[in-house]
């Protein structure tokens, strides 16, 4: 009966532990996936908007520059000058150096050609342009940039036409479509992205980037609508970004496949799902083990009652010892300060004594110095006891790294002496102070020095060197141990990876130390000595000259 009860209790506890553990993980994972997707979509939209805005600026600047250039020509040169072929030839030679211009033609206000320079003289010779749409628009507007059309040349092109200030002639220039298309095709998009320019009727004004679009779909035609700035539209698996060019005559359209641009989100999704699955398995195993353990403990509760009482008594004793140690440290500090005060007073009195009258003055001074030295040593011990009984503070203070190294070594002196390990301090005496979290940095130094002592074992040597430049303080901890094998050099920072014998290390020390140094804005690295005789661990901490008063101000 009891066995069945215990089995039922085990199952209930297993289910309870499992769901209590996995539900928060599932909620966090789901939230992370949703947030990651929203951020990825937002980043994609920002990228698309930036690409479209950049191309808009480039293309509009190109068109505006051409219009301003030809407008200047109409203001500088009268009809009598441009009617002379040699003058127009020289002008065209100058303008065509950029490679953007195909031809230039002077036309009277009746549409009859006057002079022409370019490769299509036979196609446009004696052609009247009065019925051309661009000609009529130029007369009305004064300046006109046409859509892409074939016209008399039978090849796609577009023209920029301007009427002179005196309304005597029209200057028409044909723009090199290849140079214009290059402005569009230099857009940086993914391998499946498309970018194209269309007019208000949905007609392509330049070949699409991938060369796969000859016309817009019915849905894409709906994007041709008045709007200011950049418009973003999500349709199915595609994101469209559009903006108007050429004073609202052309629409620049960017088409990006969303899935192709959300690869980072897909990777994140797979990682989160994998983590949730692995975590669920771990929680299930832990739940089973923990439930069995609890039920076993309940079954043996009566037999272990005495042991439990002894265990609680031991815990209480250790807590009392901790409180006693803190109390003793406080109590010892008071007489120590009194002894130090009296010794200092005695030292001041001895300085006033006449050496000829006091024959043992030197011995007295030495005795007073020894009293001060040992009082200081005892005070440091009590301060150490008090320091380690408090919660570690994460407040940043001005820290002298050399003092921190020496204080850390004081905890390991006995261990080094037992193993006959030589510790050499090569400290930069000009080392500046820096604003950092001294206690956390000391935790890292303590771990690295302990690792060095473990590596050299008996009769070894450990060197600790400090140095600095204008921006960083460097701490090198090197040993003459066997070094680190090349194949595991990059693995030592992984959590739970250790090269120590079973039971001597958890594999978390270096991982935690690296995280601490990174949070302090520094770096932690490791390498073998060039001669292969040992390893070097290097800590670099930025020099921060801020003081607490600066922070408060």
Image: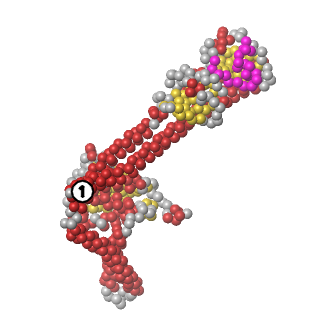
Which image quarter holds the N terminus? bottom left
Picture quarter containing residue 150?
A: top right
Above/below status of 466 relative to 347:
above
Furthest residue to the front? 1
Above/below status of 542 relative to 362:
above
Q: Can residue 428 be seen in this snapshot? A: no
Q: Residue at x 43, y 43 (%)?
A: 33
Expressed as whole percent of the image width and height from the top left, the position of residue 149 reads 63, 18
Q: Is residue 482 left or right of residue 475?
A: left
Above/below status of 12 relative to 230:
below
Q: Residues within 10 Å of mark 1 (few under 14, many from 20)?
A: few
Q: Is residue 403 left or right of residue 124?
A: left
- Coloring scheme used: secondary structure
Q: Is residue 260 left or right of residue 514?
A: right
Which residue, given by chain and number where applicable, does mark 1 sit on? Answer: 5
Expressed as whole percent of the image width and height from the top left, the position of residue 40 reads 48, 40
Q: Residue at x 38, y 64 (%)?
A: 392
**Quick one: SS at disc 1?**
helix
Q: Residue at x 39, y 55 (%)?
A: 517
Residue in the foreground of this view, choosing between 133 and 514: 133
The total of numbered circles placed on residues is 1
Q: Which residues are magenta?
A: 128-149
Residue in the foreground of this view, choosing between 408 and 514: 514
Picture quarter containing residue 399?
A: bottom left
Q: Is 386 one of the magenta-colored residues?
A: no
Expressed as whole percent of the image width and height from the top left, the position of residue 544 reads 47, 58
Residue in the foreground of this view, choosing between 498 and 231: 231
Q: Can residue 129 be seen in this snapshot? A: yes
Furthest residue to the bottom? 357
Q: Is 137 one of the magenta-colored residues?
A: yes
Expressed as whole percent of the image width and height from the top left, the position of residue 266 reads 42, 38
């Amino acid at each position: 009966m009891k066995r069945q009860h215990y089995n039922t209790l085990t199952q209930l506890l297993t289910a309870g532990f499992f769901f209590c553990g996995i539900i928060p993980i599932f909620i966090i994972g789901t939230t992370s996936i949703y947030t990651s997707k929203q951020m990825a979509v937002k980043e994609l939209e920002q990228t698309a908007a930036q690409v479209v805005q950049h191309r808009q600026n480039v293309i509009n600047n190109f068109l505006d520059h051409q219009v301003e250039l030809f407008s200047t020509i109409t203001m500088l040169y009268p009809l009598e000058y441009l009617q002379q072929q040699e003058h127009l030839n020289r002008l065209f030679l100058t303008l065509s150096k950029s490679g953007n211009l195909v031809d230039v033609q002077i036309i009277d206000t009746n549409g009859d050609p006057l002079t022409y320079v370019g490769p299509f003289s036979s196609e446009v010779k004696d052609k009247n342009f009065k019925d051309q749409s661009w000609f009529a628009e130029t007369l009305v507007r004064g300046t006109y940039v046409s859509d892409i059309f074939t016209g008399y040349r039978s090849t796609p092109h577009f023209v920029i036409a301007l009427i002179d200030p005196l309304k005597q002639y029209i200057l028409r220039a044909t723009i090199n479509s290849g140079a214009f298309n290059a402005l569009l095709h230099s857009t940086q998009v993914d391998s499946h992205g498309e970018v194209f320019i269309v007019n208000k009727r949905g007609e392509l004004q330049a070949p699409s980037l991938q060369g796969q679009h000859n016309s817009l779909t019915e849905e894409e035609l709906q994007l041709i609508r008045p709007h200011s700035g950049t418009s973003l539209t999500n349709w199915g698996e595609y994101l469209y970004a559009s903006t108007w060019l050429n004073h609202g005559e052309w629409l620049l359209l960017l088409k990006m496949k969303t899935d192709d641009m959300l690869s980072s989100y897909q990777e994140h999704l797979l990682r989160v799902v994998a983590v949730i699955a692995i975590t669920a398995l771990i929680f299930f195993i832990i739940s089973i083990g923990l439930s069995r353990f609890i039920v076993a403990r309940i079954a043996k509760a009566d037999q272990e009652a005495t042991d439990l009482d002894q265990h609680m008594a031991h815990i209480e004793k250790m807590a009392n010892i901790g409180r006693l140690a803190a109390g003793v440290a406080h109590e010892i500090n008071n007489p120590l300060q009194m002894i130090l005060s009296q010794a200092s007073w005695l030292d001041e009195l001895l300085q006033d004594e006449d050496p000829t009258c006091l024959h043992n003055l030197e011995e007295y001074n030495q005795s007073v110095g020894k009293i001060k030295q040992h009082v200081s040593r005892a005070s440091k011990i009590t301060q150490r006891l008090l320091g380690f009984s408090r919660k570690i503070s994460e407040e940043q203070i001005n820290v002298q790294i050399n003092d921190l190294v020496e204080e850390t070594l004081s905890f390991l002196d006995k261990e080094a002496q037992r193993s006959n390990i030589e510790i050499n301090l090569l400290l930069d005496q000009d080392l500046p102070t820096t604003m950092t979290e001294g206690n956390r940095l000391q935790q890292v130094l303590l771990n690295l020095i302990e690792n060095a002592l473990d590596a050299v074992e008996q009769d070894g040597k450990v060197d600790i060197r400090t140095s600095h430049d204008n921006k960083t303080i460097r701490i090198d901890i090197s040993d003459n141990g066997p070094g680190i094998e090349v194949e595991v050099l990059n693995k030592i920072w992984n959590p739970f990876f250790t090269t120590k014998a079973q039971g001597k290390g958890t594999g978390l020390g270096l991982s935690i130390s690296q995280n601490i140094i990174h949070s302090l804005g520094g770096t932690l690295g490791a390498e073998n000595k060039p001669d292969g005789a040992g390893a070097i661990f290097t800590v670099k901490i930025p020099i921060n000259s801020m003081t607490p008063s600066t922070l408060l101000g």
